[in-house]
Image (cartoon, grey):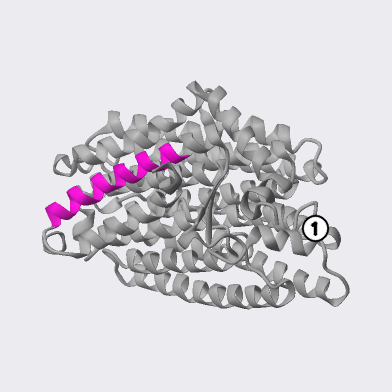
Amino acid sequence: MSQHLTSLPVLLPMLAAILMLMPPCGKNLQIRRYVSVIMGLVSTVASVSLLAYVKTHGTQVYAIGDWSAPFGIVLVADPLSTLLVSLTSFLGFVCALYSCAGDDEQGSFFHPLLHFLILGVNGAFLTGDAFNLFVFFEVLLIASYSLLMHGGDKRNTRAALQYVILNLVGSSVFLIALGILYGTLGTLNMADMATRVMELQGDDVYLAKIGGLLLLVVFALKGALLPLHLWLPNTYSTAMPVVAALFAIMTKVGVYSMMRVYTLIFGEQAGELSHMAQHWLWWLAIATIVMGAIGVLASQDLRKMVANLVVVSVGTLVALVAAQTIDSSAAAIYYLVHSTLVSAALFLIADLVSRQRGKVADRITAGRPVAQPLFLGGAFIFAAVTVIGMPPLSGFVGKVWILKSTLESAHGHWFWPIYLIASLAVLVSVSKAGSTVFWHHTGKGEANTEEKAHLVQVVAVLMLVAASPLMVIFAGPMSDYAQFAAVELHNFYGLIQHVLGGK
C-alpha cells in the first residue's frame, strides 16, 4: 500500500466529492455532512501519513499508469509538497466541520465543491508536470467559482465575476507560456525541463525566458502579487467567511509554484536563465507588502482587514522566494503554515463576531456587544498576537526567522525597514479593530444570545487558533522539518535523480 500512498491526497477528495453527488448523499444534507467531515479527516490522516513516510524514506515519485517520467504523468511527494498537502487537508477538514453549523445550507453542493477544491490544490502541490499544474489549477478554480457564489448577493456576484474574468485571462496566459516552453524544450515534466534549460543556446534562450516570465505573470495573479492583487480584498471579503478561510491556502499555490519553477527550472543551474525572475520578485514583493499594509490601515471591517493581511503575507513569502537561499526557503515554509492557519482563523472569528453584533456586523465601529465575549475576545487576541508577530506565539518565531534569513540578501537593506514598518501598521490596525469591536459598545442593544456560536464552530476556531502555540511548543521539530524541506527543495540533482532516474 505504501507505493500508492502518494496518490491518496488526490484520490480521497475526488472520491468524497463523487460520493456526495450520488444517492443517498446527494439528497440528504445530514448524510452529506457526515461524509464530508469523515472524508476530510481521512484525507488529513492520509496526508500526514504520507508526510511521515517521506520524512523517513525520502522523496517518493508515483508514476500514474506506470508510465515513467518524462513520458508519463508523475506525482512527486517531497518534504515541501507533503507538508502543504497536509496543511490543505487539515484546513479543508476544519472548514467542512465549521460549515455544518448552517453555512452549507446557503447553496447547493457546498461539500462536493469543497472536496473538489482540495483535490485541485493537493494535485497542484504534488504534480511533477507543468501541464498538469495547469490542469489542477483549473480544477481548483472551477470549484472556487461556484463556492464564491454560495450565499451571495449583488456585491458578492460582482466580486466573483471579476475573479472569474481575471483567472480566465490568467489561464490563457498559462497555456501560451506552456506552449512556448514546450516548443523550446520539448517537454513539460519539470525535472526534465530543468535539465534541458541548461543546454539552451541562441534564440531558444530568449524564447524560454519569455515563457518563464509569462509564468511569473500567471503565478503573480494566482498568488495576488502586486499589481495583480486587486481582486483579492474584494473577493475574499465578500465571500462566505468559511469559503474565505478555505481560500487562505489558494494564494499559497501561486507562491509554491514560484518556489518550484524558479528554484528547480530557472534556478542556479539554469545557465543563462539562472535566477531570471529574482530581481522582479524582490521589488514586486516589497511593493505588495506596502500596498497590503496600506489596505490593512484603510480597512473598515474585519473581513477586509484579514483579506489585506493575506496580501501582506503573500508579499513576505515572495520576498523569501526571491532571496533564493536554503535559510530563506525554510523561513518561508514555516511562515506559510503559520500565515495560512491564522488567516483562516481570523476569517472565521470575523464571521462569528458579525453574527452576534446585528446590523453593525463586522464593521470596525462601536456596536452591540458580542454574546460570547470571553471565547471570541480570547480567540481574537490569540490570533491578533500571532498575526502581528509578537512573542510568544508562532508569528514572532516566523518574523525573527524571516529577518535573519534576509539580513545578508541583496535587497535586505530595503526589505527590513519596509517589513518592520508594515508590521507596525498591522499592529496599529489590528489593535484598533480589536479594542473597537470588543470594548466600544453603543449601549443601545444587548448581546444577541440567539446567535451564539454552534459547538462545531467553536471547535473549528479553537483548532485553528491552537495551531499557533503548538507551532511554538514544537518549534524545534517544526523548524528542523522546514530546514529539511528547504534543503530538498534546493537539492537540484537529487530531485532530478528521483524523478528521472538514470536518464
- x, y (%) of residue 444? 22, 43
Question: Which of the image's four quarters has the N terminus?
Answer: top left
Please indicate whether residue 387 sits to the left or right of residue 43 in the image. right
Disc 1 marks a residue whose amino acid type is Ala
Q: Quadrant of residue 130?
A: bottom right
Q: Is residue 56 above or below residue 150?
A: above
Question: Which of the image's four quarters has the C terminus?
Answer: bottom right
- Residue at horizontal 38%, vertical 61%? 238
- x, y (%) of residue 233? 48, 59
- Residue at horizontal 58%, vertical 49%? 312
Q: Residues within 10 Å of mark 1 (few under 14, many from 20)?
A: many
Q: Nearer the viewer, residue 445 or 22?
A: 22
Q: Is residue 57 above or below residue 25?
A: above
- x, y (%) of residue 394? 52, 30
Which residues, given as a range, are shown in magenta? 29-50
**Helix, strand or loop at disc 1?**
loop
Q: Which residue is mark 1?
A: 270
- x, y (%) of residue 123? 47, 57
